[in-house]
């Protein structure tokens, strides 16, 4: 008999994820740039807009000359604001442009009014100038790598997951409809009466740009949740601590909210290895074979929840089945369970008594 005894404490950053937003509820907002000019933010707020995105930078050499007055004016009017960076993937690496963005207004501050920064990645508008296609001359693998580099560097610099602004058509064409960025809030651009189909990886959009102009200055937008949820996205992410221990084939994970604010949509994913499969998991979990996924809907400040996972050996294939031959049980040197919560990975390896 083998026994695992492991205790780990980690802190992860939680965020309001797009899949947890309420549908059918909207909060009005705008997006502005240098082309919008000076904005009467008090009037915009009075007309019902609660948030604004302001163009900060582009590539590695453009800064919106009106950024400070637009960004500061929205805050002075009591609006929640965020900055966005217009990507030029052919000019430099994603990490370099993330640094340029953060250094020129795109950072994040825990003032309750600042949304995470936005990566605006869409059709190449300078095709006549640079001679490149809609995807800036990058293939799908290169595009995914570029977006990965930008979002990773932005999180490293700010502690927040960048919002991604794009269209479904561009995303499908230029990334092959990659589903790996679902942890980043989606700001969907689709002008019309409905958002329509979404890019892969996002069950719904967090923000929707429905028109490039309208009754309010700049682009016309809505947040797909409630005003309290929008305010949560501007707050510091809650801190989640996790401790794990196991005996035999039973693994116990304790998740604790150590922050001051409630944490919503805490996702725990796991995978067992070493010839094992998930036999039982719960509560709030679904498992299939070697994988398990759990969602804790809400953790109040100081609240803890306990998850239990039980594993069993994978049985060898028996002889006599059509198209199957007997397969002896394989001997594994190690077995265990890996757990992921946010950006933190826990690997629990059994130890001999």
Image: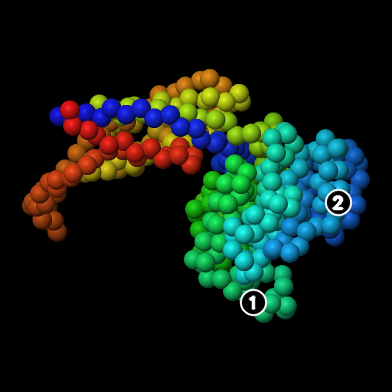
Residue 261 point in image, percent of width and height:
61, 25
Q: Is residue 210 above or below residue 250?
A: below
N-term mark: 1 or 2:
1
Name the quadrant containing residue 352: top left
From the viewer's perspective, is residue 67 above or below residue 303? below
Residue 49 relative to residue 170: left or right: right
Label 1 environment density (alpha carbons within 10 Å; few <14, some 14–19, many ≥20): some
The foreground one among 103 and 337 is 103
Q: State the residue lying farthest toward the top.
A: 302
Q: Secondary structure at mark 2?
A: loop
Residue 47 placed where, x, y %? 87, 40
- SS class of the residue under badge 1? loop
Residue 340 at least partly seen: yes
Q: Is the residue under label 2 in contact with that under label 1 (CB below 8 Å)?
A: no
Q: Which residue is drawn at the image coordinates 63% and 52% (left, top)?
A: 164
How many numbered marks, from 0 up? 2
- Height in image: 128 above or below 178? below
Marks 1/2: CA–CA distance: 31 Å
Q: Residue at x 31, y 36 (%)?
A: 348
Horizontal side, residue 6 vs residue 300: left or right:
left
Looking at the image, residue 231 sits to the left or right of residue 178; the answer is right
Q: Residue at x 76, y 62 (%)?
A: 62
* Quadrant of image for the N terminus: top left
Question: What is the x, y in percent for residue 25?
Answer: 69, 37
Would you name the residue on which mark 1 appears?
132
Q: Given this view, does label 1 or label 2 mark the residue nearer the observer?
A: 1
Q: Against 308, is 207 above or below? A: below
The residue indicated by pointer 2 is 217
Indicate the quadrant where residue 92 lies: bottom right
Q: Look at the image and name its color scheme.
A: rainbow
């Amino acid at each position: 008999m083998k026994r695992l005894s492991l205790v780990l404490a980690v802190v992860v950053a939680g965020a309001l994820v797009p899949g947890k937003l309420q549908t059918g509820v909207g909060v009005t907002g705008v997006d502005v740039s240098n082309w919008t000019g000076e904005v009467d933010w008090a009037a915009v707020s009075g007309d019902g807009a609660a948030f604004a995105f302001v163009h900060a930078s582009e590539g590695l050499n453009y800064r919106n000359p009106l950024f400070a007055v637009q960004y500061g004016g929205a805050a002075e009017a009591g609006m929640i604001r965020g900055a966005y960076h217009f990507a030029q993937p052919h000019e430099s690496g994603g990490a370099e442009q993330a640094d340029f963005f953060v250094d020129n207004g795109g950072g994040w501050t825990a003032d309750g009014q600042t949304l995470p920064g936005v990566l605006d990645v869409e059709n190449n508008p300078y095709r006549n100038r640079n001679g490149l296609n809609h995807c800036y001359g990058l293939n799908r693998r290169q595009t995914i790598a570029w977006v990965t580099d930008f979002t990773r560097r932005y999180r490293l610099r700010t502690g927040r997951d960048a919002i991604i602004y794009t269209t479904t058509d561009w995303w499908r064409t230029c990334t092959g409809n990659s589903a790996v960025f679902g942890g980043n809030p989606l700001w969907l651009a689709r002008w019309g009466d409905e958002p329509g189909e979404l890019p892969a990886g996002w069950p719904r959009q967090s923000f929707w740009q429905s028109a490039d102009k309208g009754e309010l200055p700049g682009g016309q937008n809505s947040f797909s949740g409630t005003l309290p949820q929008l305010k949560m996205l501007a707050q510091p992410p809650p801190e989640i601590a996790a401790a794990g221990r196991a005996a035999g084939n039973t693994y116990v994970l304790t998740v604790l909210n150590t922050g001051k604010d409630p944490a919503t949509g805490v996702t725990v994913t796991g995978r067992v290895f070493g010839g094992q499969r998930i036999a039982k998991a719960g509560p709030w979990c679904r498992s299939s074979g070697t994988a398990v996924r759990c969602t804790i809907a809400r953790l109040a400040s100081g609240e803890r929840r306990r998850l239990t996972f039980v594993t069993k050996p994978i049985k060898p294939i028996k002889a006599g089945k059509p198209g199957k031959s007997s397969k002896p049980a394989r001997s594994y040197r190690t077995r265990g369970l890996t757990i992921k919560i946010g950006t933190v990975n826990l690997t629990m390896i059994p130890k001999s008594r």
